[in-house]
Image (tube, grey):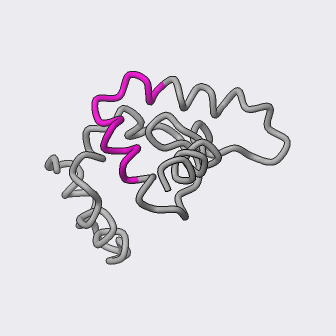
Amino acid sequence: MDPLEVELLMAPGVDISLLRGYVLRPAWQRRAACRGQGPEMFFARLGDDGAAVQAGKAVCQTCPVQPECLAFALADPMSRGVWGGTSQETRQAMRRASA
């Protein structure tokens, strides 16, 4: 964690659950290419044509932690959105195929 992140998380009024969630986050997430990107690239919205999600998947293709991200999402069947360059539907199919 860099000093600016520590400073922001320790600022007065910061919800302790935010700090807890950040500390418990897997270390690989801090090196992810999607870090700092908006969630709209990784979560489809009703009526969306999918272009935003395709942009999110493109970010995943350049990510140094893509394998860790995909493993994380495959281990959590409740994960939504794009993780490790895959959609929720793709991960469901991958789980079925490995069962």
| Residue 24 percent location from the top left of the image | 26, 66
| Residue 22 percent location from the top left of the image | 30, 62
Name the magenta segment's main secondary structure: helix
| Residue 61 percent location from the top left of the image | 43, 24
Residue placed at 53% from the left, 58% from the top? 79
**Which residue range is magenta in the image?**
59-72
Q: Height in image: 15 above or below 11?
A: below
**Residue 68 falls in image quadrant:** top left
Q: Residue furthest toward the bottom? A: 16
**Residue 40 falls in image quadrant:** top right
Residue placed at 35% from the left, 35% from the top? 66
Q: Height in image: 14 above or below 86?
A: below
Q: Residue furthest toward the right? A: 47
Horizontal placement of 34 versus 55: left or right?
Answer: left
Horizontal placement of 69 versus 39: left or right?
Answer: left
Question: Is 9 within the magenta?
Answer: no
Total number of numbered discs in the rendering: 0
Q: Is 44 in front, or is 96?
A: 96
Residue placed at 28% from the left, 29% from the top? 64
Q: Height in image: 40 above or below 60?
A: below
Q: Is 10 in front, or is 45?
A: 45
Horizontal placement of 76 versus 16: left or right?
Answer: right
Q: Height in image: 41 above or below 78?
A: above
| Residue 34 percent location from the top left of the image | 42, 36
Residue placed at 50% from the left, 56% from the top? 99
